[in-house]
Amino acid sequence: MMRCRWMVMVALLLAAHCSLFISRAAAQNVVDEVIWVVGDEPILKSDVEVMRIQAAMEGMRWDRNPDCAIPEQIAVQKLFLHQAAIDSIQATESEISAQVEARLEYMISQIGSREKLEEYRKQSISQIRSSMHDELRDQIMIQRMKSKLSEKVTATPAEVRRFFKDLPQDSIPYVPTEVEVQIITQTPRIAPEEINRVKDQLRSFTERINKGETSFATLARLYSQDGSARNGGELGYTGRGQWVPEFSSVAFNLTDPKKVSKIVETEFGFHIIQLIDKRGDKVNARHILLKPEVSDSAITASLNLLDTIANEIRAGVVPPVLKEVLMADKYTFEDAVNFFSDDKDTRNNRGLMANRSERGQTSKFQLKDLPSEVARVVDTMQIGQISAPFTMTNSKGKTVCAIAKLKNRIEGHKATITEDFQVMQEVVLEKRREEALHKWVTDKIKNTYVRINDEYRNCDFEYEGWIR
């Protein structure tokens, strides 16, 4: 059974990869032309073809003619990105890198290894990482722009009650199963030899740059393990608060564009930095990021430690090392969190995971909103049960080991005003946000230069104003 599941997962992943290969091939075979212009941004026929094939491979269905819906969707995205640029909304390289690494690690976990992923994609890990960079950056910026445009949308309790009072019974939303999860994480120890290897490699880069043998940008393209590698490591003009403190402190103190910084350690790995330019309170710099690799033996050691901790909690036996400190007869998951968990956010909350969004924080998760590795583990667990140890990718893109406890499960049900007011309020808010964003797009179209090829002039568009 496990082998069958593995084969299914690999097949699905390969289908997604194939879609990318087909998309590229399709784009290359299309006689390309500019079919729309939005502002000063062109939309190419190949752009539409790529989105069409990827959507088909993902099983997406269009409620309108895709020949019309797809270019319109691309055009709307360009409107949001254009406004994000005007409003100085940015996605920091650290945010993009974290999302790139999380997606990359998930793909690796599904396919089995980095080598298998490179073989199937016919790209190096660096090339795969680079190919995801711009897409994820745009996704972050578009979402932030939408949030800003709809941030003043409200719904009072009276409005929510009135909305649902008039809602037909079969239209009342279904609340999916929600869970509350506690977690203990252990970060596998990286061997000093591996750290020294990475530092020595960065020192050799600095030496080659200083001798004039090669440029910083060239080495960044070849070796940096950050999404900015495709741009020669260049990060663009960035404010001090948009980089992690350790990186920002060094980058903003650089004064000579010809010099390379000392080695900087951050939560993402080890960097060297080169100043490009300073403009007011912003700096443009390039960097090379290298990440020490965690050995299989270190991962095994962390998993074994967590397995021991889980067994001691299940038995309620206080470990000898904690008897004098704990001064208790029973050993709980919360006790183990305090003494052993590496993650400060969950450790300070008795191990309870927090579901954070721009609209607030809750301890309840739908399974789809949990990290995929955690969701797979808790899906079949009983309340109070502690999982076997497993590996996962944290928010920084690093591999960590963990055990989870299912604290609570609220089975899926029809929403009620007394038990699920927040869910109902969110339905009303989401409807109003969609209305506000629809109005914004329509108004934006009126004030934006748009040129559309004649073949699209008979389309039934979602938004008014494209045709003039």
Image: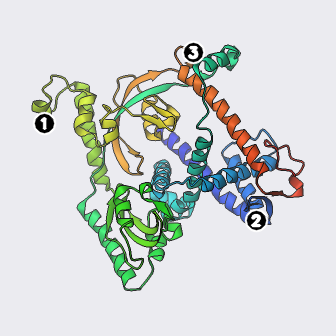
- Give the label, 3 or 1, closer to the camera: 3
Q: Secondary structure at mark 1?
A: helix
State the residue at coordinates (50%, 50%). 103
Instruction: From the top left corner, tell me how far across and down residue 160 is, in percent.
Output: 62, 20
Q: Residue furthest front?
A: 280
Q: Which residue is mark 3?
A: 417
Q: Residue furthest bottom?
A: 212
Which circle's residue, 1 or 2, is located before the other in the chain?
2
Amino acid identity at mark 2: Asn
Front position in the image: 35 or 357:
357
Q: Where is residue 20, by image quadrant?
A: bottom right
Q: Is residue 303 visible?
A: yes
Amino acid identity at mark 1: Val
Q: Which residue is mark 1?
A: 321
Q: Which mark is residue 29?
A: 2
Alpha carbon distance from label 1 to label 2 = 67 Å
Q: Secondary structure at mark 2?
A: helix
Q: Which mark is residue 63?
A: none
Identify whether 452 is placed above or below 381: below
State the residue at coordinates (33%, 29%). 386
Identify whether 5 is placed above or below 334: below
Q: Secondary structure at mark 3?
A: loop
- Give the label, 2 or 3, closer to the camera: 3
Instruction: From the top left corner, tell me how far across and down residue 291 is, in percent.
Output: 37, 61
Which circle's residue, 3 or 1, is located before the other in the chain?
1
Amino acid identity at mark 3: Ile
